[in-house]
Image (cartoon, rainbow, N blue to C red):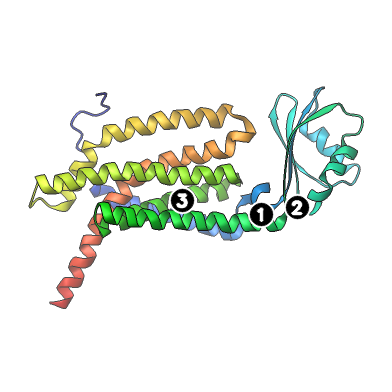
Amino acid sequence: MLQFFKNPNFNIVGKRKFAFILSIVIIVAGIISLFVQGLNFGVDFAGGAKMQIEFKKSISAEELRTLFTDKDLGNPEIKSSGTNEYMITINANDAENSDDLLKEALLGIDNTILQIDKVGPKMGAEMRNNSLQAVGIALLLILIYITVRFEFKFAIGAVVALLHDVLVTLAFFSFFQWEFSLPVLAAFLTIVGYSLNDTIVVYDRIRENIKIHKGKPLPEVINLSVNQSLSRTIITSLTTFFVVLILAIFGGQVLFGFSIAMVVGVIVGTYSSMFVAAPILIAWGHYFKSKDEKKK
């Protein structure tokens, strides 16, 4: 088996306080950003019309934007999606008249409409609510599954790690105002599954080593377990990372949201399985140990 590290002995548990502080700083900054500037919701959630158009002759985004503004047809969002191809997004208020607006703005310019997506504002709000419910139900089912397979303290660690991954990735989407659409939501749910798989591998090794090394302090068992699964984690993560990174760079505007969410998610998910999910078990043990001592 390919191994990046032979007999690694990194002190993962010893870095847990620094990791927790780093995560809290990013999450708090992300929450502040969400309140200040929010998320850049795409047509799927905010409502509106998104049209992918191919032009026969070369034309710039600025020239396209001028065609709308000079005729008082609004100021749509225009992004390049290929050679002489553009994604034109019209807001929810003008979505019903998007066909007429487009026809008037591009009058006399040879073009082909490749794709049109229209969503009303009410439907967009409903989809946002359904998305939150989907993520909440997924986390609840994961909590139940880990509790049944391992123990409740393991389940808490897994769910905290998954919430961490979702919040950190959301923070990046808010910081950089990347468009949040249905494909991005699909990426978030994929991140949850990917991170959970990584966490379960580490948890399995911890559970095995607790039985093998009875009487050994839990921090030492966790360090041993994380180090033993480190090569597998790095190989799996790098394989996925390179694929989604190539998609983010060369996949164009259509795939950018999904792929960049996966790029951030893979990095954060790998980090959380080692520095969040596993060390949470130590924090959990200290908490109940101190409660028991107070009772005595």
- Residue 52, image x, y percentages: 73, 34
| Residue at the image point whose x is 60% and y is 59% from the top | 36
Secondary structure type for disc 2: helix
Front of the two marks 3 and 1: 1
Secondary structure type for disc 3: helix
Secondary structure type for disc 1: helix
- Seen as rendered, the residue at the extreme left is 215
| Residue at the image point whose x is 47% and y is 53% from the top | 167
The numbered disc on residue 92 is: 2
- Seen as rendered, the residue at the extreme bottom is 295
Front of the two marks 2 and 3: 2
Q: Would you identify the image quadrant in which residue 4 lies?
A: top left
Q: Relative to 138, is 109 above or below?
A: above
Asked whether 176 or 48 is in front, the reply is 48
| Residue at the image point whose x is 46% and y is 42% from the top | 190
The quadrant in which the C terminus is found is bottom left
Q: Which residue is mark 1?
A: 124
Residue type of the residue flagged with mark 3: Val
The numbered disc on residue 227 is: none
Closer to the N terminus: mark 2 or mark 1? 2
Q: Relative to 288, is 178 above or below?
A: above
Closer to the N terminus: mark 2 or mark 3? 2
